[in-house]
Image (cartoon, grey):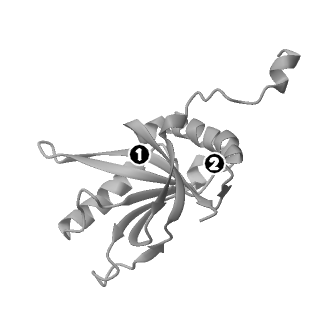
């Protein structure tokens, strides 16, 4: 690398489209949770499918239902077989007594929405977007990162085959000041 290249700040975003980065406010919510332990590339769509079908059968799913995925571990540090992932379906505060409701803390988030939602098998793309968001956008933004990132999930039904397609349409980081 040339000496003048070393002194230049990073300003070329390969994965992150800066025009798609925005600060939003997500509402506080209650969620029904399911968990996945293992690779972030395999198995999570099946957990989502079970949760989605559970919610759909109880008429808890609409086009505006918030579905939040939360990767709990850094894939650069934690081995895939020990990684935790939360699948959360936003619901009303009261309802089915057999299912415990867990609070989801809303607030201010930096959000990146993708033109084409990303499949779990394409986790490498997400990791690169997270990396650029954490390492380059966040330090220059004036915001401070508060906790685990979240992934906003879309479920598409193929009624002809009774199958579901699970994809990530956006990633977000909780930030402050709120």
List x then y, in percent, for residue 109.
53, 57
The quadrant of the rendering that contains the C terminus is bottom right
Outermost residue, right direction?
3
- Determine whether, in the image, residue 92 is placed left or right of residue 7: left
Does residue 178 appear in this view?
yes
Circle number at residue 79? 2
Residue 76: image quadrant is top right
Q: Residues within 10 Å of mark 2 (few under 14, many from 20)?
A: few
How many neighbours does mark 1 have within 10 angstroms: few (below 14), some (14-19), or many (20 or more)? many
Work out whether 130 lies above or below 11: below
Identify the residue at horizontal 39%, vertical 71% (top origin).
31
Q: Secondary structure at mark 1?
A: strand
Disc 1 versus disc 2: distance between alpha carbons?
22 Å
Tell me if 44 is positioned left or right of 163 in this view: right
Disc 1 vs disc 2: which is toward the camera? Answer: 1
Q: Decide which of tag 1 and tag 2 comes sooner along the chain.
A: 2
Image label count? 2
Quadrant location of residue 95? bottom left
| Residue position for label 1 | 168
The spot of residue 50 in percent (x, y) is: 30, 59
């Amino acid at each position: 690398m040339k000496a003048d290249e070393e002194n230049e700040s990073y300003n070329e975003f390969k994965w992150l489209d800066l025009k798609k980065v925005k600060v939003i406010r997500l509402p506080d919510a209650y969620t029904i949770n399911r968990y996945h332990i293992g690779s972030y590339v395999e198995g999570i769509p099946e957990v989502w499918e079970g949760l989605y079908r559970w919610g759909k059968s109880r008429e808890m799913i609409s086009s505006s239902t918030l579905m939040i995925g939360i990767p709990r571990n850094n894939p650069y540090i934690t081995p895939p077989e020990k990684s935790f992932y939360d699948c959360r379906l936003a619901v009303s505060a009261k309802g089915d007594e057999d299912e415990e409701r867990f609070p989801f803390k809303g607030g201010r988030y930096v959000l990146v929405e993708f033109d084409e939602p990303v499949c779990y098998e394409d986790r490498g793309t997400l990791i690169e977007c997270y990396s650029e968001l954490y390492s380059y956008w966040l330090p220059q933004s004036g915001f401070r990162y508060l906790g685990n990132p979240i992934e906003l999930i879309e479920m598409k039904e193929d009624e002809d085959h009774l199958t579901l397609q699970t994809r990530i349409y956006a990633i977000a980081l909780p930030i402050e000041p709120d």
